[in-house]
Amino acid sequence: MNQKRRVASCLAIYQTPMTWIKLVYTVAMIGTSTTALANGITLNEQSTSSAGTAYAGRSSSALDASTIYGNPAGLTRLPRSEVTGGIAVLSIKDDINDSQSNATGTSKGNSVPLSAVPFAYLSTPIDERLSVGLGLYAPFGLVNNYESSFQGRYFGAYSKTQAITLQPTLAYRVNDYVSIGGGPTLNRFDAKLQNNLATGALNNGKETLVTIKGDDTAIGYNLGVLFDLNDATRWGVTYHSKVSYDLKGQTEVTDAPAVLPLNGKYNATIALDTPESVDTSITHHFNDRWTGYLSTVWTRWSRLEKFEAINSGVSAAGQSFGLGSVGETLNWHDTWAGAVGTSYQLDRQWLLRAGYSYDPSPVQNADRSVRIPVGNRNTLTLGAGFSPNADITIDVAYAYIWDSTASVRQSNNSGLQPSYSAEYDNSASELSVQLTYRY
């Protein structure tokens, strides 16, 4: 591609018609009914080619344009313009055992609906040193929707949070050994949480429902550096910044009994920081066929101390019942996750992958809730890349995910939330597919 064509490709990315951007954003919003498949509320589903090795080597491999998320410096390793897009479909089971509560009801589990996480990327080189790109992906998400008779509904009947990120990216090759890259992130975060209050005895059997909703758009950034240690080994480091949201929305209380003057809609603000993370990995080519990948990720989950809606317009009676501030303590701690993977070049068209990752829970037993009942997470993956020619690659990956048994112990501190305890055994299957076109 000559210089004029490279510049034209660059302009095409940043002058993409608004109809295309709106379409992709709409698809992402519709498709991202998500649940966390890393741990906490993190999503890993931004690349199928990385999924095949359990995301080992994500910050050092630069396999395709999805490196915009994995390590933006990797764009300098893509010699041609690329369009990459895909989707991950998730089937999640949360089996609940040994449930105990003062409330009547059920504990069926399987509260997470079949979910899908889409992603899309564009990239192009300007010259031998400078490359640009644009990515759209979901870095965080959670959904669970328990049955209406769930015994733990007083601590979480419905939960949905999702973040969608648009990331323009620049990458520069400093010399033959070092590349740097990064870009700002435009992040949209939406949240909706519901729980019941045990007011049936005061209200002809009706329970009060509390709904908190809010959304915000905020700016962050991602940075990466990539080192070619020698012809066979590459090392990468990627930093994903924290993003500080000031969610605006409302807290709505319905079906409260007359003796509890709480019914109404109240303007709510929620301060929330999604955590920063550092991903570092090594990719090593043992020979023309075998490649190994090793990764570790540090996530600063301690930023999530609580989720609290500050409500305005609450009456004195409402204040006395604690309606001025509604939420829950999280008290999460920082974690280190690790992954190892390998790939085998079967022939000119087929590349086979496998991997394993371990991601410890950011929450201790004492603070675990029915909204996010996560344990220490293990993942086994298999994947393949098929390239019928030099212009097209189709990647597929399958992952089986399981948690260690997670204990939930929630107490009746308000008088309107009957205590609940249970053991959660979570598992999931994930199928991901991705298409990359080079031109």
Image: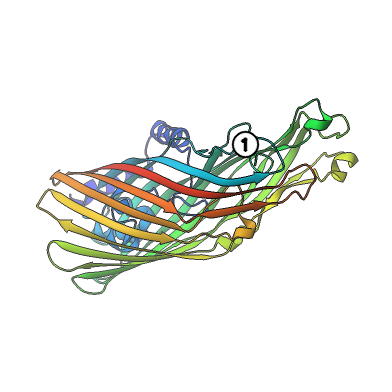
Residue 321 in sight from this viewpoint: yes
Determine which residue is flagged by label 1: 150
Residue at the (68%, 44%) spot, across then down: 101
Front one among 439 and 128: 439
Q: Amino acid at mark 1?
A: Phe
Quadrant of the rendered structure where residue 149 is?
top right
Left or right side of 223 for 389: left
Identify which residue is drawn at 33% across, 59% down: 356
Identify the residue at horizontal 33%, vertical 54% (top origin).
Answer: 380
Q: Residue furthest left?
A: 347
On the image, the x and y values in percent for residue 283 come to 26, 66
Is 275 displayed left or right of 4 in the figure? right
- Residue 176 picture location, percent across and down: 23, 70
- Residue 17 on image: x %, y %: 38, 34
In this rendering, is residue 292 above or below 199? below
Q: Quadrant of the C terminus?
A: top left
Depicted 404 relative to depicted 36: above or below: below
Considering every residue shown, the one lying at the far top of the view is 204
372 or 149: nearer the viewer: 149
Query: Horizontally, is 283 left or right of 373 in the view?
Result: left
